[in-house]
Image (cartoon, rainbow, N blue to C red):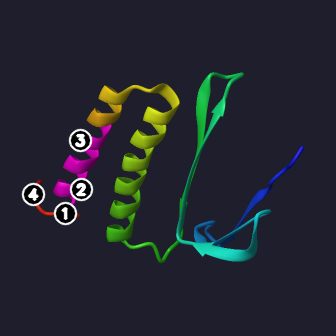
């Protein structure tokens, strides 16, 4: 059985605010830097989602808007692949488009 490991290293300031975020993975031998992490895990025992949302001091508001928009759109793709709920995935994408327009990430749709 093959195993893979993903490791995050978070450098914090004196107030425990992330300054740098680095990650490595078994299949990726380089130490990569990121400005933000949005991680969701399903806890079947508690029947709930556990989340870790971190961003460093250098993350700009416009970058956060793009991160959230892209996350919404890929979440719709993931939801459709996992459930085959095409209508709801489409509604999620419509909201993603609405979000992008309101955040001025794109022009009027």
The mark that comes first in sequence, 2 or 4, is: 2
Q: Which residue is mark 2?
A: 100
Residue at the location (44% across, 27% down)? 84
Per the image, the residue denoted by label 1 is: 106
Residue at position x 72%, y 76% from top? 31
Residue carrying label 3: 94
- 67 sits left or right of 47 in the view: left
Q: Is residue 95 magenta?
A: yes
Q: Circles 2 and 1: CB distance less than 8 Å?
A: yes
Separation (CA) of disc 3 from disc 4: 13 Å
Question: How far apart are the alpha carbons under marks 2 and 4?
Answer: 9 Å
Q: Earlier in the sequence, mark 1 or mark 3?
A: 3
Mark positioned earlier in the residue sequence (3 or 4):
3
Q: Do residues under tags 3 and 4 come within 8 Å of each other at their CB atoms?
A: no
Closer to the camera in the image, 96 or 18: 96
Identify residue for label 4.
108
Q: Earlier in the sequence, mark 2 or mark 3?
A: 3
Q: How far apart, in angstroms, are the residues tagged by discs 1 and 3?
A: 13 Å
Q: Position of residue 96 (x, y in %)?
A: 28, 47
Q: Secondary structure at mark 4?
A: loop
Q: Residues within 10 Å of mark 1 (few under 14, many from 20)?
A: few
């Amino acid at each position: 059985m093959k195993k893979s490991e993903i490791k995050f290293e978070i450098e914090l300031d004196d107030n425990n605010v992330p300054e740098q975020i680095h990650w490595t993975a078994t299949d990726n031998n380089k130490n990569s830097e990121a400005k933000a992490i949005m991680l969701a895990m399903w806890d079947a025992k508690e029947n709930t989602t556990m989340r870790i949302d971190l961003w460093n001091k250098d993350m700009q508001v416009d970058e956060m808007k793009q991160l959230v928009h892209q996350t919404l759109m890929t979440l719709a793709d993931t939801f459709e692949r996992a459930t085959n709920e095409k209508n709801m995935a489409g509604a999620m994408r419509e909201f993603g488009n609405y979000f992008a327009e309101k955040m001025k990430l794109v022009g009027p749709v």
